[in-house]
Amino acid sequence: MRWLYFMSRLAFVSNIAFILCLVLRYRTFMEEKDLVATLLILGWLMPLGLNAIVNTTHSILFVAGKRELSPVPQWLITTNALFFIVQAYLFFIA
């Protein structure tokens, strides 16, 4: 289950990039175009799919009663789930 821990951490980093992309949407504070392009890819394209995979896997483990097999801390699971809800709202509803 180390792959789940890695994917959860990667989703968290993508969520931080998502926050930076939201800030970039209203205010430009970086002049490096390459850095902005990388940040946009990491912040807009990756987090929704990555969070969907991670949260689905955590939900399956929780329903199956095998939560103890997951090496991921509870705060990381909760944070990724909250970010997923916000991202789904912003991408599909707003």
Image (tube, rainbow, N blue to C red):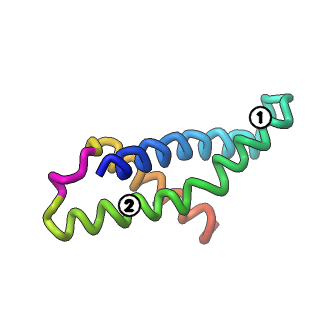
Q: Position of residue 5 (x, y in %)?
A: 35, 46
Residue type marked 1: Leu
Q: Position of residue 77 (x, y in %)?
A: 33, 49
On the picture, is 40 further left or further right than 66?
A: right
On the picture, is 38 further left or further right than 6?
A: right
In this picture, which residue range is highlighted in magenta?
67-71
* Relative vertical location of residue 31 with respect to residue 39 in this rendering, above or below: above
Name which residue lies at 44% across and 63% down: 53
Residues 46 and 87: in front is 46
Numbered circle sitting on residue 35? 1
Numbered circle sitting on residue 6? none
Quadrant the C terminus occupies: bottom right
SS under mark 1: helix
Q: Which residue is mark 2?
A: 55
SS under mark 2: helix
Q: Nearer the N terminus, badge 2 or badge 1?
A: 1
**Residue 93, image quadrant:** bottom right
On the picture, is 57 further left or further right than 26?
A: left
Name which residue lies at 86% across and 36% down: 33
| In magenta segment, residue 21 | no
